[in-house]
Image (spheres, helix red, strand yellow):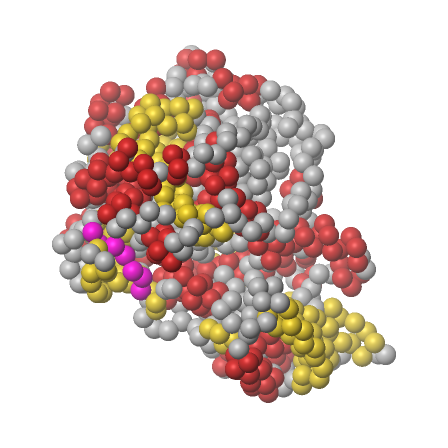
């Protein structure tokens, strides 16, 4: 996670006028007195909140890794453990609903550590006045999603809050998965030379939600890509090849699903975590025409838009083609592409060669991605 | 300055006395007000800014000017006269007014 | 997307740059006026594609950046009122006033809404007859037709609970200020394409003639900006100084007459204060008297809050093209989009914000080759004293 301290570190700036370098920084590190919407967007404000409020309170080695899931060793078994809350609005949208999102979101967090998702819990906060039929619909969707993801919902909780105190329905799911021995996948394993593989079209989920809110119509329907990725991950890990020893599946270093903050934010997190650089090629990144159009109209950048059924994989170069081939044979990886590579230079920074031939730095998203109008 | 993008008019209608249109951008369709380009027909392209079409795209002119760009030859660097000049001299390439002190020197 | 994608062609871009090399014999400094053009340049790395010696400096064409702090504070005061629905374009939500931004006001319970079109305010007003709907009408001439329509329809349809807080600014007076400053290095302009789609470009002839500078009205896509730059370079090399139109597929000399007509029925030109620059005469639009019922400045009596600009901020000079974001010691350190200290960082289209968003503060390839340290300024160069104090002050905030 990028440390917010870096922004405010004392630096000596050399200028023609010889202005005094500021030794004592008068600005407090975290001066927000109220939580703002941007704190939940998955960008810089979110990581500031984590760094300044949560980490100092709960500090321990597992938490500090700040992966999307915690990998715990209990009685000799390696378990992946994760939790996520879902507050999306509207609760029903093309391609899914809050229930489906709640199941697959947590399943995917587990899958990104190479774990086989096993059990989920679900806690519901319902707003007084929510139509029971809506709840039924959400629950039915969760049941279908659980089957799709090969998991069992084994425990849960329900609370009701007063009208106006909760936006229809909030769901928190927590999940446990089992990591086979020989699998070691995490952000800090990224290495220079690794190829960056993206499993398909970006921006579908975020733009579906945005367009529902903004009242955009689409020629060809755009829908959320919400899907469980454990099957795709299993297929990738099971590749047999002369390069791979039977004992370890060591050719996939990192897996991440680019949810809030999009591909750009996710790759930045990995780059900073592993202290490596990355270079992408804009022309290789798959974006649907409808998503491109919606982004143009709203002034958004697809690289920062949330995805719910995609993954990024950092793979050793000699295995990249084999992994790509395997992914393309899976329904959720048909449009997979190699979009860049990990490099030694400019550690912590992600660059992108633009369509026009220039070079652009992709920084982490900060705050809420506001539609740029003017 | 402002985010304005070109789109194709796919439908026109009146709303509360205002001329409106459905405009298509890539695969997205959005509403825009046509009051400032009232003669626009379905199938034509307009430039839309904050929900208003502020100009029509002159397709013939677009074609002509784009072709002119494509017709630019791509010479190699070595043929460029600027490079030849630079090679002949050790002098710094920036003229006086670029130095500190600028135009007042 | 038609009329967009083809203007991002890398091969044609290379040809235009090759043509630049062919005609260029000496260095030139050009200013692109619009924030959208700045954004496009930085996002696509266009300035790094240009031949050695061609420098692009960034102009004041970001209406969010130049909205005075007093106006922002007024907007915030209105937004805090309990019976007000405050509507705005997305860009203004993150702009901090003296005490917080619209996002914060929203989190504290204010009814703040992002609108796509000013006409949305009419719908909101009709749906909420007991509330006062106030629209933050900022922008250059490009947005004036849309804002004018809101005021016009509000009066025509007698939607009496909607009003506009107007902070419109005009481009030509700002160019005059830039060209008249004695530290000015700008030798040619990439003119504002979308502003001219509305207003035409006849206003720029006298500026071009008086100061002997080429003004090429330019679009926003990479090929537009490169072609506009090429046309400006050609004029400079040939010693010409006229107004040319690169963006001819979108606009012609007279602009959009119906739009100009409604603008003149609703607005009149007047003096306006520009953040970071000061008051420029006849540089803004105000609602005409007959629209007083829809003029939020007249309807809402909000007390003047003492505004305080950070001393270290050099956005005034950045807006006038005299300095670049790199020249500011606070850039990327004390001053970031999360903690903006001044005008050019607050808006996504300000030069500092654009540079930051595209990573220029991280500077992976060492010093920007086109980055120049500018000549020292004399007291006569600045239009308002506070800016000079900020430049030479060693005190931290």
Membership of A182 in magenta stretch: no
Residue B60 percent location from the top left of the image: 15, 53
Query: Seen from this angle, which residue lies furthest right?
Result: A75
Q: Position of residue A10 (x, y in %)?
A: 69, 35
Label count reads 0
Whole-percent x, y for residue A99 in the image: 57, 77
Can I make out residue A338 in this image? no
* Residue B92 vertical placement versus C57 (above, below): above
Quadrant assignment, res A232: bottom right
Q: Quadrant of residue C313?
A: top right
Q: Is residue B33 magenta?
A: yes
Establish if C10 lies above or below C255.
below
Query: On the rendered structure, is C122 left or right of A223?
Result: left
Segment tinted magenta in the rendering: B29-35
Which x, y percent locates residue C340? 56, 38
Q: Is residue C334 visible?
A: yes
Q: What residue is drawn where x is 33% and y is 65%?
A: B28
- Using the image as rendered, state which of residue C301 and residue A42 is in the foreground: C301
Image point (37%, 64%), residue name: A216
Q: Is residue C306 depicted above or below A136 in this figure? A: above
Q: Could you say which is closer to the camera, residue C391 or residue C274? A: C274
| Residue at screen point 74% across, 68% down | A70
Split into 4 quadrants, where in the image is the N terminus of chain A? bottom right
In the image, farthest residue toward the front: C130
What main secondary structure does the magenta stretch of the protein show?
strand
Decide which of B96, A82 is in the foreground and name it.
A82
A50 vs C355, left or right, is: right
Q: Residue at x 42, y 67 (%)?
A: A212
């Amino acid at each position: 996670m990028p440390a917010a301290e870096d922004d405010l570190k004392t630096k000596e700036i050399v200028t023609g006028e010889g202005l005094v370098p500021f030794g004592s920084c008068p600005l407090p590190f975290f001066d927000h007195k109220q939580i703002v919407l941007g704190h939940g967007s998955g960008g810089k404000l979110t990581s500031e909140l984590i760094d300044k409020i949560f980490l100092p309170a709960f500090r321990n080695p597992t938490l500090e890794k700040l992966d999307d899931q915690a990998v715990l060793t209990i009685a000799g078994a390696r378990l992946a453990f994760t939790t996520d809350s879902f507050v999306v609005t509207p609760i029903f949208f093309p391609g899914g609903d809050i229930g489906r999102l709640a199941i697959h979101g947590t399943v995917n967090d587990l899958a990104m550590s190479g774990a086989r998702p096993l059990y989920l819990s679900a806690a519901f906060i319902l707003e007084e006045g929510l139509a029971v039929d809506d709840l039924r619909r959400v629950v039915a969707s969760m049941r279908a999603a659980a089957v799709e993801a090969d998991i069992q919902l084994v425990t849960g909780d329900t609370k009701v809050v007063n009208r106006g105190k909760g936006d229809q329905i909030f769901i928190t799911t927590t999940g446990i998965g089992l990591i086979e021995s020989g699998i070691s996948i995490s952000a800090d394993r990224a290495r220079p030379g690794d190829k960056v593989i993206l499993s398909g079209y970006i921006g579908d989920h975020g733009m579906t939600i945005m367009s529902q809110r903004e009242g955009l119509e689409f020629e060809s329907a755009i829908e959320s890509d919400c899907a469980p990725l454990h099957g795709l991950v299993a297929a990738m890990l099971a590749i047999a090849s002369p390069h791979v020893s039977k004992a370890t599946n060591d050719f996939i270093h990192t897996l991440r699903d680019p949810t809030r903050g999009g591909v750009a934010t996710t790759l930045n997190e990995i780059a900073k975590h592993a202290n490596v650089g990355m270079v992408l090629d804009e022309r290789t990144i798959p974006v649907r025409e409808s998503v491109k159009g919606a982004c143009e109209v709203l002034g958004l950048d697809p690289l920062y838009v949330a995805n719910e059924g995609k993954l990024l994989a950092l793979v050793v170069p000699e295995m990249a083609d084999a992994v790509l081939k395997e992914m393309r044979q899976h329904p959720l990886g048909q449009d997979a592409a190699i979009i860049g590579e990990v490099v030694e230079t400019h550690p912590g920074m992600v660059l992108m060669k633009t369509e026009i031939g220039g070079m652009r730095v992709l920084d982490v998203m900060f705050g809420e991605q506001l539609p740029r109008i003017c | 300055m402002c985010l304005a993008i070109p789109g194709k008019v796919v439908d026109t209608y009146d709303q509360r006395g205002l001329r409106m249109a459905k405009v298509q951008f890539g695969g997205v369709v959005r509403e825009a007000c046509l009051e400032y380009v009232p003669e626009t027909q379905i199938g034509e392209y307009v430039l839309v800014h904050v929900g208003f079409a502020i100009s029509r795209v002159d397709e013939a002119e677009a074609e002509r000017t784009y072709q002119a760009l494509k017709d630019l030859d791509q010479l190699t660097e070595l043929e460029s006269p600027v490079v030849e000049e630079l090679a002949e001299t050790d002098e710094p390439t920036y003229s006086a007014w670029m130095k500190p002190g600028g135009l007042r020197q | 997307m038609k009329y967009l994608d083809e203007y991002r062609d890398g091969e044609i871009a290379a040809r235009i740059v090759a043509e630049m090399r062919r005609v260029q014999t000496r260095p030139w400094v050009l200013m692109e006026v619009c924030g959208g053009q700045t954004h496009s340049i930085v996002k696509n790395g266009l300035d790094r594609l240009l031949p050695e010696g061609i420098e692009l400096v960034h102009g004041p064409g970001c209406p969010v950046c130049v909205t005075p702090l007093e106006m922002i504070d007024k907007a915030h005061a209105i937004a805090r009122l309990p019976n007000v629905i405050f509507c705005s374009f997305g860009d203004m939500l993150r702009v901090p006033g003296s005490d917080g931004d619209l996002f914060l006001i929203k989190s504290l319970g204010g009814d703040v809404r992002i609108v796509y079109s000013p006409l949305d305010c009419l719908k909101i007003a009709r749906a909420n007859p007991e509330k006062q709907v106030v629209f933050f009408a900022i922008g250059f001439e490009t947005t004036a037709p849309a804002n004018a329509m809101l005021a016009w329809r509000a009066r025509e349809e007698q939607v009496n609970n909607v009003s506009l807080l107007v902070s419109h600014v005009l481009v030509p007076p700002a160019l005059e200020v830039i060209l008249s400053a004695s530290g000015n290095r700008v030798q040619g302009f990439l003119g504002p394409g979308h502003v001219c789609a509305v207003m035409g470009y006849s206003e720029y002839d006298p500026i071009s003639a008086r100061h002997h500078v080429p003004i090429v009205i330019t679009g926003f896509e990479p090929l537009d900006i490169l072609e506009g730059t090429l046309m400006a370079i050609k004029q400079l090399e040939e010693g010409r100084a006229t107004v040319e139109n690169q963006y001819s597929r979108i606009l012609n000399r007279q602009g959009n007459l119906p739009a100009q007509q409604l603008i003149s029925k609703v607005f009149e030109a007047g003096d306006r204060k520009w953040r970071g620059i000061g008051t420029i005469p006849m540089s803004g639009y105000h609602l005409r008297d007959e629209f007083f019922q829809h003029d939020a400045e007249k309807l809402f009596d909000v007390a003047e809050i003492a505004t305080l600009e950070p001393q270290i901020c050099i956005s005034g000079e950045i807006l006038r093209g005299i300095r670049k974001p790199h020249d500011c010691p606070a850039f990327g350190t004390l001053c970031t989009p999360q903690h903006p200290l001044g005008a050019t960082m607050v808006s996504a289209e300000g030069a500092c914000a654009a540079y930051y968003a595209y990573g220029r503060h991280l500077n992976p390839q060492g010093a920007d080759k086109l980055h120049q340290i500018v000549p020292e300024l004399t007291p006569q160069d600045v239009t308002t004293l506070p800016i000079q104090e900020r430049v030479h002050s060693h005190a931290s905030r």
